[in-house]
Image (spheres, rainbow, N blue to C red):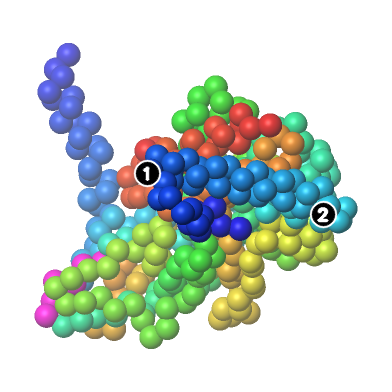
């Protein structure tokens, strides 16, 4: 058995599916878009990703569309004195020039409202994001188990 | 009563030695402590009967809800086992799955002690979350979770008992989201409040608190 080769093969399988998820258009790059498993009847899902702006002008994520959901919105989540509040981001989410914004658990996220079917782990959810300057960018959110806290297969918090 | 303040200096014609001063101060403290303890004792004896719960625990009280299997679950029926209780809704995209998964992970982290407490999820969205919805939702976390729903009046009662803030907030398209308290409340096997776990606390702190809830009473 060739262990080094096997390790390389394993590493490749671990990285490729993620790398394949990234999307780019103009100055905007989307990295590691992912979503969480949902239960039947749950109805709503969330999408997370890192949005990088390599340009010299700021951009805005305005919203999006998806065949998998009735509506796609950009939401913020804040904790205020122990109370969780979620709100649609009005006027678009600014993506600073030469910077980026992480959409992640506990913060900004894409809200998939009115899911047509439950999101199963391993599935890919097609979403077209709409930016003020970069226009439409198609991404696929990779569905992770409900306990996931990041794009990679999670084993929970340690 | 404030036991931290030093007692007023006693008028003593011959200046006492530093050791004597210390002795006096200590005696004063003993007196204050004894008086304070006595006062607390009488206060606890004399509280009105209806106020017993409010004095005994900051959070919790009597409630009756329905679990995912359709059976009634009350504060009394939960007695005998400590539990961690959390309020949310199944369409909550982030903090609810994160918290429930955290509880599932903490249960694993505690090893043998992990089976010594219940995890209870209470939906504050009776309009959407029927008991079947809650059942399918909590099932995803791979560990037994008691999912509770109830009538508006039953939810009002449990929410009041745990002093949960929640508010339905309309969003576009006739839909709504729910702002809600995201703390986890730990209750011991006798039904008394132990402490809360905050979402920002580390897992080691949370595990210690759970252990405390398990061993208490």
The residue to which callout 1 is attached is B18
Is residue A18 located in the magenta-colored stretch of the structure? no
Picture mark count: 2
Spot occupied by residue B9 in the image (x, y as percentages of width and height): 48, 56
Rendered view: A93 above or below B59: below
Q: Which residues are magenta?
A: A51-56
* Picture coordinates of residue B89, whole percent (x, y): 62, 59
Q: Is A118 situated left or right of A79 in this image? A: right
- The quadrant where residue A108 appears: bottom left
**Numbered circle sitting on residue B116:** none
Q: Is residue A52 magenta?
A: yes
Tag 1, which secondary structure? Answer: helix
Asked whether, in this view, residue B43 is left or right of residue B88, the answer is right
User: Which x, y percent locates residue A52?
Assistant: 21, 67
Asked if labels 2 and 1 share a chain, the reply is yes
* Residue with the mark numbered 2: B47
| Badge 2: chain ID | B
Q: Residue furthest bottom?
A: A91
Between residue B56 and residue B27, name the one nearer to us: B27
Q: Quadrant of the N terminus of chain B?
A: bottom right
Q: Residue at x 46, y 54 (%)?
A: B13
Q: Compared to A60, does B32 lie above or below?
A: above
Q: Chain of mark 1?
A: B
Q: Residue furthest top?
A: A1
Residues at marks 2 and 1, CA–CA distance in whole angstroms = 43 Å
Identify the residue shown where x is 71% and y is 43%.
B192
Q: Quadrant of residue B151?
A: bottom right
Q: Quick one: label 2 or label 1, which is nearer the N terminus?
A: 1
Instruction: Find numbered disc 2 in the image and state the secondary structure of the residue it sits on.
Output: loop
Can residue A52 be seen by looking at this rendering? yes
- On the image, the x and y values in percent for residue B97 come to 52, 51
């Amino acid at each position: 058995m060739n262990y080094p080769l096997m390790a390389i093969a394993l590493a490749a399988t671990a990285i490729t599916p993620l790398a394949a998820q990234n999307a780019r258009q103009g100055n905007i790059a989307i990295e590691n878009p992912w979503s969480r498993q949902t239960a039947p009847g749950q109805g709503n899902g969330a999408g997370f990703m890192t949005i990088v702006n390599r340009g010299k002008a700021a951009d805005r994520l305005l919203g999006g569309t998806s065949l998998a959901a009735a509506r796609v919105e950009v939401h913020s989540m804040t904790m205020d004195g122990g109370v969780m509040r979620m709100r649609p981001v009005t006027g678009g989410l600014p993506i600073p020039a030469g910077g980026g914004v992480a959409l992640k658990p506990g913060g900004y996220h894409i809200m998939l409202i009115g899911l047509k079917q439950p999101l199963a782990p391993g599935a890919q959810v097609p979403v077209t994001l709409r930016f003020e300057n970069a226009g439409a960018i198609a991404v696929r959110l990779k569905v992770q188990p409900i306990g996931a806290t990041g794009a990679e297969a999670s084993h929970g918090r340690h | 009563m404030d036991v931290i303040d030093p007692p007023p200096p006693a008028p003593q014609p011959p200046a006492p030695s530093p050791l004597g001063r210390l002795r006096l101060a200590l005696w004063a403290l003993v007196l204050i402590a004894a008086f304070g303890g006595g006062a607390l004792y009488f206060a606890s004896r004399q509280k009105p009967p209806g106020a017993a719960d409010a004095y005994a625990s900051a959070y919790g009280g009597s409630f009756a809800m329905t679990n995912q299997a359709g059976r009634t679950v009350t504060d009394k029926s939960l007695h005998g086992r400590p539990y961690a209780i959390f309020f949310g809704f199944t369409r909550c995209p982030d903090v609810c799955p994160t918290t429930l998964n955290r509880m599932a992970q903490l249960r694993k982290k505690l090893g043998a002690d992990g089976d010594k407490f219940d995890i209870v999820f209470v939906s504050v969205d009776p309009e959407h979350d029927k008991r079947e919805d809650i059942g399918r939702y909590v099932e995803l976390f791979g560990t037994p979770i008691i999912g509770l729903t109830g009538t508006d009046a039953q939810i009002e009662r449990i929410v009041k008992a745990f002093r949960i803030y929640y508010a339905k907030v309309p969003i576009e398209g006739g839909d709504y989201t729910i702002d809600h308290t995201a703390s986890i409340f730990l209750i011991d096997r006798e039904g008394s409040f132990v402490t809360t776990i905050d979402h920002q606390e580390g897992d080691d702190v949370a595990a210690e608190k759970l252990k405390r809830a398990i061993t208490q009473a």
